[in-house]
């Protein structure tokens, strides 16, 4: 864990030195930098999910027939044969069903975000620093509430913009619960730690809101391009 945290600690200290040892500004700058680096992966994954769904929608009649045959299949051999037929159909149309899962962006961003998170949490310099109206080393109720609101808004924006843009169905109840639980968890976590972490969450959440709006615009444009191609 030390090998993961130490580079981020050095980056925080180096960035703070550029702003007269202002660790609040260092957290904001590095949070934005990390999010900028991760943004292309996240946007690309959303576009890939959109493309996969478009292809799956076109194959739906054929897939429905195969799935009906599988439900009526009497033997494991027959089911296996139909599964192979389904995989051949995917291959023919260049579809990878697993590409919509999106594990790679998560796997890449987790070490970065965890390293930055623990570097903030373990830094004595950050704990002793004041930024705006609060101390980075102490809990701040106002910033905690802002962090919860930002992540709730981020969830609502993603539900309103990304789901219609991708052509997906309306969000189910489990997704609605996740959207409520995440801000609550952030609020409770912020109440038990220093204000440096909710500052990190506020900046990251605001960036995600902007990223969601940009992704939504790209998907809407992609939908228009698909409609033009289908009509021509």
Image (tube, helix red, strand yellow):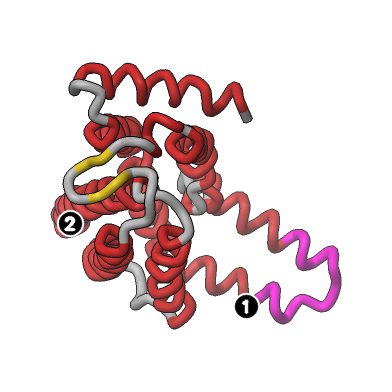
SS label for mark 1: helix
Which badge, 1 or 2, is on the more N-terminal residue? 1
Spatial CA distance of label 1 from label 2 is 33 Å
Q: Residue at x 42, y 19 (%)?
A: 10
Q: Is residue 108 left or right of residue 88?
A: left
Residues in magenta?
Answer: 68-81
Q: Nearer the viewer, residue 62 or 8?
A: 8
Circle 2 is placed at which residue position? Answer: 220
Q: Within 10 angstroms of label 2, few (less than 14), some, or many (20 or more) residues? A: some
Q: Position of residue 150 (x, y in %)?
A: 26, 61
Please tell me whether residue 87 belongs to the stretch shown in magenta.
no
Observer able to see residue 158 = no
In the displayed orientation, state which residue is furthest to the front.
128
Image vertical order of residue 124 relative to residue 53, above or below: above
How many numbered callouts? 2
Circle 1 is placed at which residue position? Answer: 68
Q: Position of residue 42 (x, y in %)?
A: 36, 43
Q: Quadrant of residue 168?
A: bottom left
Observer able to see residue 15 = yes
Q: Nearer the viewer, residue 215 or 230?
A: 215
Image vertical order of residue 125 relative to residue 62, above or below: above
Q: Within 10 angstroms of label 1, few (less than 14), some, or many (20 or more) residues? A: few
Q: Quadrant of residue 200?
A: top left
Of marks 1 and 2, the one in the foreground: 2
Q: Nearer the viewer, residue 87 or 101?
A: 101
Q: Residue at x 55, y 50 (%)?
A: 98
Please tell me whether residue 69 belongs to the stretch shown in magenta.
yes
Q: Residue at x 19, y 50 (%)?
A: 133
């Amino acid at each position: 864990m030390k090998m993961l945290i130490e580079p981020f600690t050095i980056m925080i200290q180096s960035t703070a030195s550029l702003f007269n040892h202002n660790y609040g500004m260092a957290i904001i700058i590095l949070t934005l930098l990390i999010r900028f680096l991760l943004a292309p992966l996240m946007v690309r994954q959303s576009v890939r999910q959109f493309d996969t769904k478009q292809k799956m929608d076109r194959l739906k009649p054929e897939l429905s027939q195969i799935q009906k045959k599988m439900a009526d299949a009497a033997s494991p051999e027959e089911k296996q044969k139909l599964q192979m037929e389904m995989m051949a159909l995917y291959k023919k149309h260049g579809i990878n069903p697993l590409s919509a899962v999106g594990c790679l962006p998560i796997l890449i961003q987790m070490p970065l975000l965890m390293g930055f998170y623990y570097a903030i949490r373990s830094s004595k310099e950050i704990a002793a620093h004041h930024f705006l109206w609060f101390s980075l080393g102490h809990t701040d109720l106002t910033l905690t509430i802002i962090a919860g609101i930002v992540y709730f808004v981020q969830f609502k924006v993603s539900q309103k913009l990304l789901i219609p843009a991708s052509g997906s169905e309306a969000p189910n109840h489990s997704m609605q619960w996740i959207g409520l639980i995440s801000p609550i968890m952030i609020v409770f976590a912020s109440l038990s730690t220093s204000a440096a972490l909710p500052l990190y969450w506020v900046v990251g959440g605001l960036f995600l809101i902007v990223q969601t709006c940009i992704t939504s615009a790209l998907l809407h444009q992609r939908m228009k391009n698909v409609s033009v191609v289908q009509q021509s």
